[in-house]
């Protein structure tokens, strides 16, 4: 989902922008561009994935004037490239949305927070739990990370948007519409989970080395 018009209080827009900037700064501090420079194949995959997700974001439903619904693919990008590169992709896509006139520039920070920071953080936590606590099983990785993790990331992003509206909505009608939107989250979660799980299944079968969070030696070679 993306907030397309400034229906939040200015102080909240600034706060979200500061948080998003800080987290993206931390991601840049991990120097993810080094891997892109050193690995031209990774560079091509990352650029192709970023452009593809940006195009898929154009397939959106205009719920109300200020809110558009679309699949985020942040969980998928996080699993494939890890969180730093995924955040760079989502940030670049949101900047492109601003340049295309799809969203107002004051909303850049809040949309990066909703579509990038929150789902990437949730997906990262789920992956860490699977990586450290659960058995080294391919189906465990696929179902817990790809299906359950992406659904949970979508839920967290949606609840974050609703929570921001509850805290700083400048229009009571917009808050009511946000609460109505929350009722549709159970319908959006399976869609994101299915597509993420399907694409991850294909990658893990044909190109497991492309998935940065997947260790094919642990999950495949030792079985």
Image (spheres, rainbow, N blue to C red):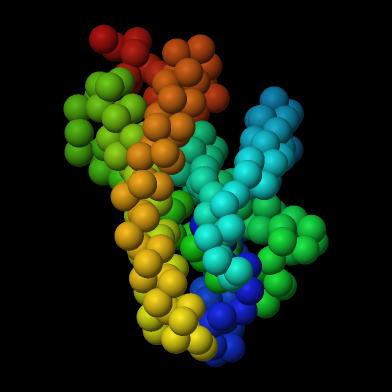
Q: At which x and y percent is residue 221? A: 35, 10
Residue 190: image quadrant is top left
- Specify whether 15 is left or right of 185: right
Q: Would you say residue 84 is visible in this rendering? A: no
Q: Against 37, is 29 above or below?
A: below
Q: Residue at x 44, y 86 (%)?
A: 172
Q: Against 121, is 213 above or below?
A: above
Residue closest to the eye, 177 or 123: 177
Q: State how many labels appear.
A: 0
Q: Would you say residue 17 is visible in this rendering? A: yes
Residue 161: image quadrant is bottom left
Q: Residue at x 33, y 27 (%)?
A: 142
Q: At which x and y percent is residue 105? A: 71, 72
Quadrant of the snapshot with the C terminus:
top left
Residue closest to the eye, 37 or 79: 79
Q: Against 78, is 23 above or below?
A: below
Q: Residue at x 77, y 63 (%)?
A: 101
Q: At which x and y percent is residue 110? A: 55, 71
- Specify whether 92 is left or right of 207: right
Q: Residue at x 56, y 80 (%)?
A: 7
Q: Against 148, is 10 above or below?
A: below
Q: At which x and y percent is residue 13? A: 57, 81
Residue closest to the eye, 173 or 188: 173
């Amino acid at each position: 989902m993306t907030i397309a018009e400034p229906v939040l209080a200015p102080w909240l827009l600034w706060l979200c922008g500061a948080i998003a900037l800080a987290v993206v700064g931390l991601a840049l501090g991990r120097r993810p561009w080094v891997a892109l420079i050193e690995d031209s194949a990774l560079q091509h995959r990352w650029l192709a994935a970023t452009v593809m997700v940006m195009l898929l974001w154009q397939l959106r439903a205009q719920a109300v004037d200020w809110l558009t619904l679309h699949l985020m693919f942040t969980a998928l990008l996080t699993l494939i490239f890890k969180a730093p590169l995924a955040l760079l992709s989502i940030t670049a896509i949101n900047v492109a949305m601003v340049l295309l006139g799809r969203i107002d520039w004051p909303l850049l920070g809040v949309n990066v927070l909703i579509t990038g920071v929150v789902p990437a953080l949730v997906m990262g936590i789920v992956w860490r739990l699977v990586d450290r606590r659960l058995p080294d099983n391919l189906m465990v990785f696929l179902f817990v990370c790809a299906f359950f993790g992406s659904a949970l990331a979508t839920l967290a992003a949606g609840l974050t948007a609703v929570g921001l509206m509850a805290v700083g909505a400048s229009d009571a009608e917009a808050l009511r519409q946000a609460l109505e939107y929350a009722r549709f989250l159970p319908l959006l979660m399976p869609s994101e989970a299915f597509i993420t799980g399907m694409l991850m299944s294909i990658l893990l079968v044909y190109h497991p080395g492309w998935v940065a969070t997947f260790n094919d030696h642990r999950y495949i070679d030792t079985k």
